[in-house]
Amino acid sequence: MNFSGKHIAITGAGSGLGRALAISLHAQGALLYLSDINEEGLHETKAMLSDSVQVQVVDVSSLEAVEDWKASILTYTSVLDILINNAGVTVLERFEEHSIADWEWVFGVNVWGVIYGSRTFLPMLQQAKKGWIVNISSIFGIIALPGQAAYCASKFAIRGLSEVMWEEFSDVGVSVVHPGGIATNIVTKSRSQHDDYKGALERFFARHSLKPEEAVRQILAGLQKEKKRIMVTKEAVLFDRVKRLSPIKGNHWCVQRIFQAMGVKRLADRDYRLKT
């Protein structure tokens, strides 16, 4: 897969992984159509690139907004080569603490955003010589981490949807990406009542996470090889293997390793506190 001259749409391009993807693909000669709900961040990304990059403020949890974005892109091209469903949000709460509004917010962006984007742009992707959908899941679409019920459920959903697409689509390729810890602002912007838990995650990401630029290098290398399943970070590769070898005990082992690295201990009542 070559990115030069390809028409590529990216959601969540106003910061983090989406911005890093845009920068790398632009440098490789791609024609970009970027969206984000954060107008300021989106225009900051464009300022790093060029006036040829098309940007639009889009709430991916709204089908109407996604369809309006498609209509705008159609004024420039009738063909889309690659759609990268990258936008994502999280809530750091235990299951019983998640409000219905939390679930609707996370699933609206993480799941419906992928569904709306894929359905809306599929006809344009089918017009390409080899159209491709890239769905950004997470290592938490493979292992389940306590304190992130809605996020894990949404990322497992993206994984399942992508695997169905593998079986159903013959004219459009699909890759599902499972990153480990990436240095983005998703934790900082998360909703949470647990300042200690959120703070521990932020410090963990600051110390151990992979830079978005390196994550992008791994993602694009996987796409160039047309991999359907792309693991990003050594930890993601390890946890994936452990979970496949032992789905239940393996998941618990991965959780314990993550909590130890965060400096958080899991108590018998399944609460989360910083180690003393």
Image (tube, rainbow, N blue to C red):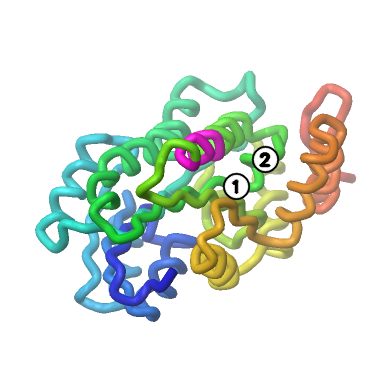
Name the one closer to the observer, 108 or 74: 74
In the rendering, at what x and y percent does residue 104 appear? 43, 27
As helix, strand or loop, the secondary structure at mark 1 comes to loop
Left or right side of 18 for 239: right
What residue sits 65% from the left and 47% below the top?
Answer: 139
Q: Disc 2 designates what residue?
A: 142
Residue 229 lies, with reference to residue 17, above or below; the image says above
What residue sits 50% from the left and 68% below the top?
Answer: 224
What residue sits 78% from the left and 29% below the top?
Answer: 271
Name the one closer to the observer, 191 or 146: 146
Left or right side of 28 for 216: right
Query: Residue lying farthest front?
Result: 170
Quadrant hosting residue 192: top right
Residue 25 lies, with reference to residue 231, above or below; the image says below
Name the one closer to the observer, 68 or 90: 68
Residue 31 lies, with reference to residue 256, above or below; the image says below
Question: As shown in the figure, which amino acid type bears the numbered disc 2?
Answer: Ile
What residue sits 89% from the left and 45% below the top?
Answer: 276
Dominant SS of magenta comes to: helix
In the rendering, at what x and y percent does residue 22 appear? 39, 68
Residues at marks 2 and 1, CA–CA distance in whole angstroms: 7 Å
Q: Which mark is residue 94?
A: none
Question: As shown in the figure, which amino acid type bears the numbered disc 1?
Answer: Ser
Q: Disc 1 designates what residue?
A: 138
As helix, strand or loop, the secondary structure at mark 2 comes to loop
Q: Magenta segment range?
A: 159-166
In the rendering, at what x and y percent does residue 67 appear? 20, 41
Q: Classify 10 Å Cα crowding around label 2: few (below 14), some (14-19), many (20 and above).
A: many
In the rendering, at what x and y percent does residue 238 appear? 79, 53
Image quadrant occupied by the N terminus: bottom left
Q: Is residue 188 visible?
A: no
Q: Are marks 2 and 1 in contact (CB under 8 Å)?
A: yes
